[in-house]
Amino acid sequence: MTTPAGPYALAPDASAENPALSADEQQFNDLIAADSRIEPRDWMPEGYRKALIRQISQHAHSEIIGMQPESNWITRAPSLKRKAILMAKVQDEAGHGLYLYSAAQTLGATRDGMTDALIAGKARYSSIFNYPTPTWADMGSIGWLVDGAAICNQVPLCRASYGPYGRAMVRICKEESFHQRQGFEILLELMQGTEEQRAMAQESVNRWYWPALMMFGPPDDDSPNSAQSMAWKIKRHSNDELRQRFVGMLVPQAAVLGVTLPDPDLRWNEDTQQYDLGEIDWAEFHEVLAGRGASNAQRLQRRRDAHAEGAWVREAAAEYARKQSERSAQVAS
Ligand code: FAQ
């Protein structure tokens, strides 16, 4: 990992008085050093604002695009109960997207600007949502592995230094932990079923395991944003630390499920007190980020179509708001 750089880079002793800093900068640094929260009206360095808009908008887009792989199964869920649960989960993801877009708006980003960037294919969203969901077991794997990875990554974000982001994450994490359990339960039921159901669950875990590890981002020595984000206490742990924590959580759960994690090199290392992992295929990760994953084109097209189909709703809402404010103005005059 590189050392934080740039005009607002923070050293661990950032709370020390520094005559070269303006009063605003000193106050910002003091708040960060004291583990306090930065709020929307507080002064903040431009780099901090941009880093937050980047991360929060990407996160919001991930939640919105992330609805698609699961919505694929709403009409085909194997029972009414499963359908109701899946619908509620997909709705939760929409809600997460909305909290996060709102948090980014407190930093000056506009909702239209963020949406335009997404549908123009200029904005990032999590690599994981560019993989297809051909089997019902994929609903289990997404819950267990994808939501599991999301929780590992997001629980520390509840302490992110920017207030609106941290507070949004608290609520999101509560819902994600329910999501993870429902995914685990789908896989458990399949693993207790027929030979064919067990094979379906294992095949799905085989496909989702490695992409789930990629969700944590590139390795620490290839993660340009980590050092500064950690110095600003947006991120609290490095990408590799969280990936390790995730695998440590998965191993005992996989044993309960009776599935095998598809990594022949996975073994406990007494010296490091963590698991040694096999090589992650970072070439695949970069291909997906470049827009060449299995489902990138389909996901973006679906988002564009949904945006176009929703135009009348936006127009109606804007017209309603215009009439309401016209009426309020008449009453006031
Ligand atoms: N996919 O320097 P770093 C969910 C980009 S929500 C795509 O390490 P950073 C819920 C990164 O943006 C899942 N791009 O970056 C759910 C940067 O590009 P940029 C989303 C990735 O920010 C479940 C470049 O690579 N969660 O799953 C990925 O320090 C089920 C260099 O990387 C969040 O967004 C990736 N996997 O660390 C919904 C959590 N990884 O912007 C539906 C918040 C990296 O310089 C169904 N975000 N990149 O052009 C974070 O914690 C961080 O932003 C990381 C990346 C850890 C994702």
Image (spheres, rainbow, N blue to C red):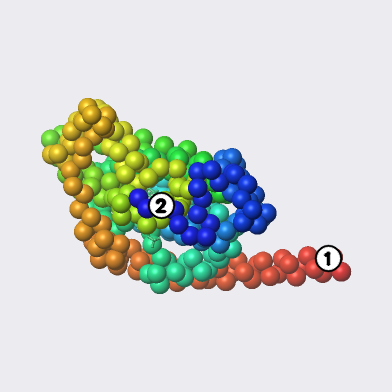
Q: What is the x, y in percent for residue 81?
A: 37, 39
Q: Choose between 148 and 11: the one closer to the eye.
A: 11
Q: Which residue lies furthest to the right in this view?
A: 333
Q: In this view, does 168 lie above or below 54?
A: above
**Mark 2 residue element:** loop
Q: What is the x, y in percent for residue 10?
A: 51, 50
Graded by Cα atoms within 10 Å as few (under 14), some (14 to 19) or many (20 or more), the crowding at tag 2 reads: few
Residue 30 badge: none
Residue that label 1 marks: 331
Residue 3 badge: 2
Kind of residue at disc 2: Thr
As drawn, is 318 to the left or to the right of 252? right
Q: Classify the position of ligand 1 by quadrant: top left, top right, bottom left or bottom right.
A: bottom left
Distance of label 1 from label 2 (alpha carbons): 59 Å
Q: Choose between 57 and 68: the one closer to the eye.
A: 57
Q: What is the x, y in percent for residue 298?
A: 30, 65
Quadrant hosting residue 24:
bottom right
Q: Which of marks 1 and 2 is nearer the N terminus?
A: 2
The quadrant in which the C terminus is found is bottom right
Q: What is the x, y in percent for residue 71?
A: 35, 53
Q: Which residue is drawn at 57% across and 58% down?
A: 45
Total count of labels: 2
| Residue labelled 1 has its Cβ within 8 Å of some atom of ligand 1 | no
**Mark 1 residue element:** helix
As drawn, is 41 to the left or to the right of 1? right
